[in-house]
Amino acid sequence: MNFIVDASVAIKWFVEENLTETALRLLEHPGLFHTPDFIVVEVANIVWKKAIRGEIGHEQAGDIINGVQDGILEFYPAALLNNRALEIALDLRHPVYDCLYIACAEAIDDGCVVTADGRLNAAVTDTLYAGLVMPLSGVAG
């Protein structure tokens, strides 16, 4: 299986949160993880929120952004996924930025989005996209 990770998983590689241990175990999977390049923007927004709340320092915020861009992930241009992501978003009535990950999973052989985002997991339940999304809590340890 080829894993597409979203920002809700990637942030857990750097910041202690619920399911961080599971996210770190995911790193034991051989090979690269795939993701739309948009993840960098999403993670930057998460670390910005954490920094202004005082949960992390400014230096750590920068280190996290550098870490996300540091070779663990194979990036796919969001511009190439946008049209399909919009179709999926309209079908699911769910935000396009989350559906970029599903579009990426469709574009990769044996792709599956791993997410800690409960709203995304709920949105795909009982749909054609259910097999393309796996909750982080469902990753075997």
Image: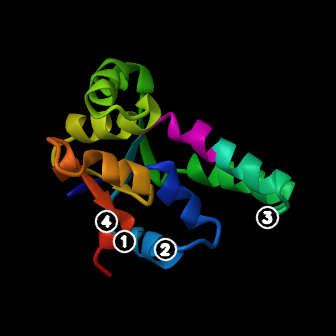
Q: Secondary structure at mark 1?
A: helix
Q: Is residue 87 above or below residue 29?
A: above
* 74 or 7: nearer the viewer: 7
In the image, residue 45 lies in the stretch drawn in magenta: no
Q: Position of residue 2 (x, y in %)?
A: 25, 53
Tell me the magenta residue range: 36-43
Q: Position of residue 33 (x, y in %)?
A: 37, 53
Q: Which residue is mark 3?
A: 55
Q: Is residue 2 above or below residue 36?
A: below
Q: Which residue is mark 2?
A: 19
Q: Residue at the spot x=44%, y=60% of the render?
A: 116
The three-letter code of the residue at mark 2 reads Leu
The three-letter code of the residue at mark 1 reads Ser
Q: Position of residue 98 (x, y in %)?
A: 42, 39
How far apart are the alpha carbons under marks 2 and 3? 17 Å
Total numbered labels placed on residues in the image:
4
How far apart are the alpha carbons under marks 3 and 4? 31 Å
Q: Which residue is mark 1?
A: 137
User: Local crowd at mark 2 within 10 Å, few (<14), some, or many (≥20)?
Assistant: some
Q: Is residue 98 above or below residue 18?
A: above
Image quarter of residue 103: top left
Which quadrant holds the N terminus? bottom left
How far apart are the alpha carbons under marks 1 and 3? 24 Å
Which comes sooner in the sequence, label 3 or label 4? 4
User: Local crowd at mark 1 within 10 Å, few (<14), some, or many (≥20)?
Assistant: some
How far apart are the alpha carbons under marks 1 and 4? 19 Å
Of labels 1 and 4, the one closer to you:
1
Q: Is residue 4 visible?
A: no
